[in-house]
Image (cartoon, helix red, strand yellow):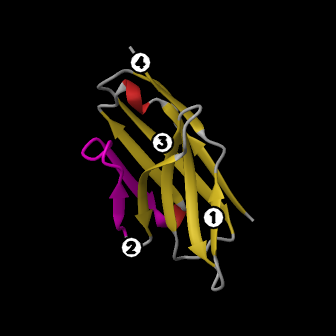
Amino acid sequence: QVHLVESGGGLVQPGGSLRLSCVASGDIPSVNVMAWYRQVPGQQRLLVASITTGGNTEYADSVKGRFSISRDIAKNTVFLRMDTPKPEDTAVYYCNTKFSNGITWLEFWGKGTQVTVSS
């Protein structure tokens, strides 16, 4: 079993900054992808950013240049640095991990943390 626990959400002013953290525990192989998704009520959950074990990153176009994903492999932790957030970044942010068990791809989610961007 794999557990993902997010922290760091809350209220942030437009133009401010916020850092989300996600600690993963359980039976996670050394090769995996960790990611942040976000969801607004009534809408689909969308990818914000992802990072591989090798450090390759991908970002949604809407956050490029403003958000930065990083990870501490030794601590099984992934971070999302949110700089100059906008009101439209308001959402529940979910931590995600994917990895292969040699047979199929497995995927796990955290419970989410609310981020509200407002003055």
CA distance for labels 1 and 4? 32 Å
Against 26, is 94 above or below? above
Instruction: Determine whether the residue tagged by mark 4 lies in a helix, strand or loop.
Output: loop
Against 100, is 84 above or below? above
Residue for point 46% across, 29% down: 90
Assess whether residue 63 is covered by the magenta stretch: yes
Q: What residue is disc 3 on?
A: 20
Q: What residue is disc 2 on?
A: 54
Task: Give the percent coordinates (x, y) of residue 20.
Answer: 48, 42
Of badges 4 and 2, the one in the foreground is 4
Q: What residue is disc 1 on?
A: 107
CA distance for labels 1 and 3? 20 Å
- Circles 3 and 4 in contact, beta carbons < 8 Å: no
The residue nearer to you, when weighing 78 against 47, is 47
Residue density around tag 2, few if under 14, some if 14–19, many if 20 or more, within 10 Å: few
Q: What residue is disc 4 on?
A: 118
